[in-house]
Amino acid sequence: MTHLPLVLGALLLIAAGSAGAAEYNQFQPAQSTLSFVSKQMGVPIDGRFRRFAASLSFDPARPTTASARLDLDLASIDAGSPEANDEVAGKAWFNVKLFPTATFVSSAVRPLGGERYELSGKLTIKGKSQDVTAPFTFRQNGRSGVFDGSFVLRRLDFAVGDGVWSDVGTVANEVQIKFHIVAAPAAERK
Amino acid sequence: MPENRYSATAIALHWLMALLLIGLFAVGLYMSDLSLSPQKLKIYSWHKWAGVTAFLLVLLRLVWRIGHPSPPLPAAMPGWQKTAAHGLHHLLYLLMIAIPLSGWLMSSAKGFQTVYFGVLPLPDLVEKDKALGELLESLHSGLNYGFAGLIIVHVGAALKHHLVDRDDVLSRMLPFRVRNIPSQRATSKP
């Protein structure tokens, strides 16, 4: 009986610990964006994907155990103009009939100090896989966790825009991909 | 002998712009029906760069013209013709400013920033807006057809002065000396 305060104290500590080390694994599609900047004739053009799914788990207390998977619906692209959207669905670009989805599967997350981390994994577009690495930041926003990162993809590594479009003087090979992923913590276990 | 001619600078600017604007008009007509290709992206960029150049040249020309008034019109010209000539010149200047401006704004509204020669980005004065983009497209094209109509009047009037009135209104803007065969009016001077 005399140990009751101690036991209660310990329980409280555990509760506090688990609250601080929440695992973020509930993807919030409405608040997340996947955008990109392509360059044509030196002109930056903003684009984005309207539909993509993510499954992830990230615990800031144990970042190296984090994992993420992204599936994006290539037909949901907004490449900047209706004309461009029609074009990039075609064979020379994404060939969405044959390859409707692009996939990213993480292999490792490395803390870089503070709120900065580095994500590595395999990106598959149009049947071609490449290892990619992207720095990102993790911030808490209210109850949600917000992941922001970007990396540069070379479209020709995935044969995106081949044939006449492989002239990188017109449409640059480098495309900057920016992700803003919002996830809620795992449902409270009480 | 008093020189009833435009200055060499004014003459050079006039003919340089004449060539540039005819080229811009022809390319503009041709490119608007092209389907998307690297070639189309190049031609659009060239058209925009040439358009910015025309805009800068017309500003230079206006500054020059303010400091160097035009030689007077022939005294024998009826007053209404002088008024019409001045009015037409004002309209041409107005359109030479309004047309590139409408093109620049249209480009911004359609989400394609103008980057002069692929290196110097011009600010987007309007946000990307589909309806505004279409409105500005109609405006740009309408102003161009209006300009083309006025140019026909301008050329017709110059030829009429040279061939019918036999005065020096055309020759004073020509880069080389073409003396009109002295007409009765000219020889009857004391």
Image (cartoon, coloured by chain):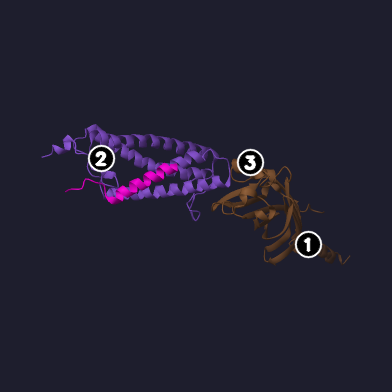
Chain colours: A brown, B purple
Which amino acid, by three-letter code, is at mark 2? Val
Label 2 crowding class (10 Å Cα cut-off): few <14, some 14-19, many 20+?
many
Magenta-drawn stretch, dominant element (helix, strand or loop):
helix
SS at mark 2? Answer: loop
Name the residue carrying label 3. Answer: A86
**Label 1 to label 3, Cα distance in Å?**
40 Å
On the same chain, marks 1 and 2? The answer is no
- Outermost residue on the front side: it is B181
Name the residue carrying label 2. Answer: B169
Q: Is residue B82 magenta?
A: no
* Residue B139 drawn at (x, y percent): 45, 37
Q: Nearer the viewer, mark 1 or mark 2?
A: 2
Label 3 crowding class (10 Å Cα cut-off): few <14, some 14-19, many 20+?
some
Magenta-highlighted residues: B1-24
Left or right: residue B5 versus residue B132 is left
Chain of the residue under label 2: B
Which amino acid, by three-letter code, is at mark 3? Asp
Chain of the residue under label 1: A
Q: Is residue B173 visible?
A: yes
